[in-house]
Amino acid sequence: MKKVVIIDDEAAGRQLIQEYLADYPDLVVLGEANNGVDATKLINEFKPDLIFLDIQMPGMTGFDVLKHLEEIPQIIFSTAYDQYALKAFEVHAVDYLLKPYTKERFKSAIERLNDNKGVQQLTNSLLMDSDDYPDKILVQFNNKLVTLAVKEIIRIEAYGDYSKIVSSEKTYISNYGISQLEEKLNKKIFMRVHRSSIINIDKIKELHKYAKSYDVTMQNGDVVRVSRGYMDAIKKIIF
């Protein structure tokens, strides 16, 4: 069973989706909203697996709604405006239904739900496309993206072309490489100590001399080696 929320400022649009969903008993509608503000509250409360999302709505656009969500579910956009299609697929929506659409077109969108790449590829750029350092980012957890407060990050570890983000509660996978994350995060707090490691200096517990380098013990007990090439960075915080 998938939990569904329908967001559309037109009652006729919401009703049509309800009618088409009648053929899919495993898709259960939990609620509806006709504006962006109510949509954000509804989605954060029910945390659905799928949302049908209009774009032009009172209060905020569908894209604005996504920026205020605690978790990002699968998204099928349903709108009368074709000029937003490219942007919709930039956030890796499952599909883009252009009104008016037929039952067959709706069916093809539903058939794409089993492909989880849309959620897996949706990066934290929704919160990180800013000149300011973010307070929160979106990170992968199971088949959803969840909000993580940056201050909760303990360390970051290279993971092939991706990165592992270790927090006080869980470990997440980021679609960004470690060098990209280094550029996105505040260098006064996040220090590169190895080509494969970034640490949050606010989460350091102890620092131990090891031969000609150092081992950093983090508050969660993880030990991170400082490589020789990054010794100058760690020496700057030793008094």
Image (cartoon, grey):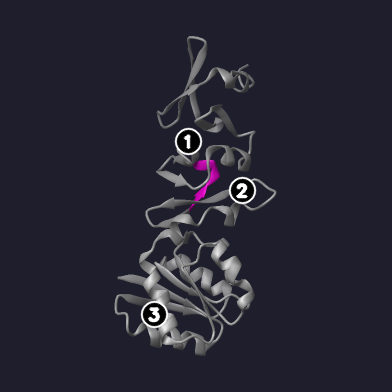
Can you identify the residue that label 3 sits on?
107
Can you identify the residue that label 2 sits on?
134
Tell me where residue 151 appears, x and y as whole percent: 54, 42
Q: CA distance from mark 2 to mark 3?
A: 38 Å
Q: Amino acid at mark 3?
A: Lys
Secondary structure at numbered mark 2: loop
State whether residue 142 appears in this view: yes
- State which mark lies toward you, 1 or 3: 3
Q: Amino acid at mark 2?
A: Pro
Tell me where residue 101 appears, x and y as whole percent: 49, 85
The answer to the question of whether label 2 and label 3 lie on touching residues, with beta carbons closer than 8 A, is: no
The answer to the question of whether label 1 and label 2 lie on touching residues, with beta carbons closer than 8 A, is: no
Q: Which residues are magenta?
A: 147-152
**Residue 44 magenta:** no
Determine whether, in the image, residue 55 is placed left or right of residue 25.
right
Kindly indicate the quadrant of the structure image that contains residue 160: top left
